[in-house]
Image (cartoon, rainbow, N blue to C red):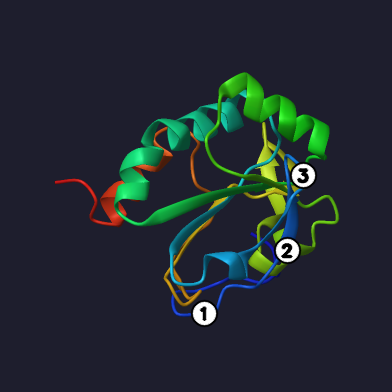
Amino acid sequence: MTDAVTLREGDIAPTFTLSDQDGKMVSLSDFLGKKVIVYFYPAASTPGCTTEACDFRDNLNSLAAAGYQVLGISKDELPALVKFKTDERLNFPLLSDPSLDIHNAYGAWGQKSLYGKAVTGTLRSTFVLDESGKVVLPLYNVKATGHVAMLRKRLGLDG
């Protein structure tokens, strides 16, 4: 982690309006009254990000049944998002943040270790927001594999 912003439980989630893979503008405020899972991933169509996205895809019905909407955010431009969504048959919006403004607002951009080297990039992070836009579960540096199972357990959705 860096000295950047770190969101905590109870914080109001930073608002955003970003373009989805189809060029449609999507705002966090569109989801007021709903629970939202906002997750940041490093790059479309890479192995870890594909694993994570497909995990959300495969669990979307049960998450939706529990009242959650999923939004994926990366720095990718729209053509990469279109390809990723199509190739993997993803069933939730992928949002483009090439300016990194939203990454920075959520503390999802900064120093990390990649193969033993310090690099600056997207910190794989997930934020669960309640119906009023408050952060109920901020998770930084999550693992791509098994992420949704861990999230379901933390949210009490298994059982």
Q: Amino acid at mark 3?
A: Val
Kindly state the secondary structure of the residue where label 1 is placed.
loop
Residue marked by disc 3: 119
| Nearer to me, 80 or 145 | 80
Q: Amino acid at mark 2?
A: Thr
Label 2 to label 1, Cα distance in Å?
Answer: 19 Å
- Residue, x 58% and y 23% (percent of image)? 88
Q: Earlier in the sequence, mark 3 or mark 1?
A: 1
Kindly state the secondary structure of the residue where label 3 is placed.
strand
Residue 108 % position (x, y): 66, 57
Which callout, 3 or 1, points to the residue nearer the camera? 1
Mark number for residue 11?
1
Residue 3 % position (x, y): 70, 70
- Residue, x 66% and y 72% (percent of image)? 15
Q: Earlier in the sequence, mark 2 or mark 1?
A: 1
- Residue, x 64% and y 30% (percent of image)? 85
Q: Quadrant of residue 113?
A: top right
Looking at the image, do the residues carrying marks 2 and 1 touch, with CB atoms under 8 Å apart? no
Q: Is residue 94 left or right of residue 143?
A: right
Residue marked by disc 2: 17
- Residue, x 52% and y 79% (percent of image)? 11
- Residue 46 seen in the figure: no
Residue at the farthest top position:
87
Looking at the image, do the residues carrying marks 3 and 1 touch, with CB atoms under 8 Å apart? no
Mark number for residue 26?
none
Q: Earlier in the sequence, mark 2 or mark 3?
A: 2
Where 142 sits versus 3, above or below?
above
Q: Is residue 24 left or right of residue 47?
A: right
Label 3 to label 1, Cα distance in Å?
Answer: 28 Å
| Nearer to me, 30 or 53 | 30
